[in-house]
Amino acid sequence: MCFGFLGIQFGFALQNANVSRIFQTLGAEMDQIPLLWIAAPLTGLIVQPIVGYLSDRTWTGLGRRRPYFLVGAVLATLALFVMPNSPALWIAAGTLWVLDASINIAMEPFRAFVGDQLPVRQRPGGYAMQSFFIGVGSVVASALPFLLAAGGVDNTAGPGEVPATVRYAFYFGGAVLLLSVGWTVLRTREYPPAQLQAWDEAPVVRRPPLDLARLARHGAAWLLAGMVLALAVAAAGLDPQLYILAGLLVAYGLAQFALRRLHPDNPLGSILGDLHHMPRAMRQLAVVQFFSWFALFALWIYTTAAVTGVHYGSDDPTSAAYNEGANWVGVLFAAYNGFAALAAMVIPAMVRRFGLRTSHLLNCILGGVGLLSFLVIDDPRWLLLSMVGVGFAWASILSLPYALLSDSLPAAKMGVYMGIFNFFIVIPQLVAASLLGFLLATFLGGEPINALAVGGVSLVVAGLCTLRVREPGAQA
């Protein structure tokens, strides 16, 4: 059931460990990189709730979720073949949009798939098993350029050219993604909707009538806030990436007005209505997810620049030192994913001993300490120790929030609610894309390693916010 996640994460890990490197190779400046990365969260914001809504209403010979696994895998494989051969920065940025949209098409239904197939008591184990396969796939994918270089493949290239180590890693990743997702599609079965409805353990929630006046007030407030921020950025000549944050505020305000007008049976109206009436546990977990994924976005986009600049002393993408450091970042990413695979086997025991909330708190604190340790470790080999904490946090983020949430979701809307829950994964990444470049240039001395420190603090805050969430089975 979870094996396909190995391939999906294989592609995702190649993206996380190498896209900043590809962008820098093709001439991107450091302050452009967060903006170029915007494809990843923005496609998730758009694609995941739509795919969740559609998959809730799909039933074919391949089942409910598996058609989406297959379509996403084929498209993502093609994008992985194209990405390292991009001749220009704008082509690489466009390919990232296609790659991330395709990964989201395949990935979103996997969360609902576990919720569909398993009863509440087995879901923590099911999501931990997803974390295990995510870890295994990411270990190999992240380390591939390093391993290929050790095997004699050329690790440097001319200006504007991606090294062969990266190109071959992406080709191999495309094949692994397609084959592993194909295995899950062919080797699993799905329960029909009527059976899922009969087994539904979530409480029935009746939607109260919409308060149209309140929606109008909130919509106007968010819309005004976004417009004021946009005008302030323009008037003061602030970092243009702050327009992303302004756009988010405007978009949320417009969504409030749209909800007042759209019929509940309209697909967009249905998604916005479910967002407005989301379960209380989801609202509480939204804060946890915000700080968690803000930290992860900082890790993914700034680790290459931080390690190559601080620990290897080079910011020249054509130099041997830079490419050696970039390969070591791949090893570090492989390490935290490997530790995550091991943590996935430990986390169920932690949950039995401490409960879901306390376990997630402990794991987030470990991750925060791991990121903060980048500031005090000089020898890059010792950064492997930092990755132990990051790995535990990563495994926990990929499993325990879903376990905390899943007993609150009705079976008939498992897909759309998992898609909406992923809003709180992609929105913090969009906020990070908007703010991190500004914070780095204005307050953090332009040093990418300081962005990792911000991520460390953010992870600790995420863990503390978990204590507000109700344990499954406890009285509200």
Image (cartoon, helix red, strand yellow):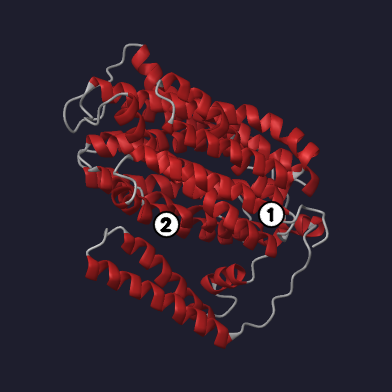
Residue 96 seen: yes
Indicate the position of residue 278 as horizontal and vertical percent values.
64, 66
Name the image quarter holding the C terminus.
Answer: bottom right
Q: Which mark is residue 405?
A: 1
The residue sitting at the left extreme is: 159
Q: Which mark is residue 431?
A: 2
Q: Which mark is residue 12?
A: none
Is there a contact, CB below 8 Å, between mark 2 and mark 1?
Answer: no
| Real-space Cα separation, disc 2 to disc 1, in angstroms | 23 Å
Indicate the position of residue 265 as horizontal and vertical percent values.
59, 75
Q: Residue at x 47, y 55 (%)?
A: 428
Amino acid type indicated by mark 1: Leu
Amino acid type indicated by mark 2: Val
Q: What secondary structure is marked by label 2?
A: helix
Q: Residue at x 40, y 20 (%)?
A: 379
Compare residues 339 and 68 and report the one nearer the observer: 339
Compare residues 215 and 228 and report the one nearer the observer: 228
Name the image quarter holding the N terminus.
Answer: top right
Q: Is residue 243 above or below residue 302?
A: below
Q: Is residue 194 above or below residue 157?
A: below
Q: Residue at x 51, y 28 (%)?
A: 386
Q: What secondary structure is marked by label 1?
A: helix
First along the sequence among labels 2 and 1? 1
Compare residues 413 and 194 and report the one nearer the observer: 413
Q: Which quadrant of the structure image shows residue 277?
A: bottom right
Q: Is residue 119 left or right of residue 418?
A: right
Indicate the position of residue 348 as horizontal and vertical percent values.
74, 35
State which mark lies toward you, 2 or 1. 2
Q: Which quadrant of the structure image shows residue 92?
A: top left
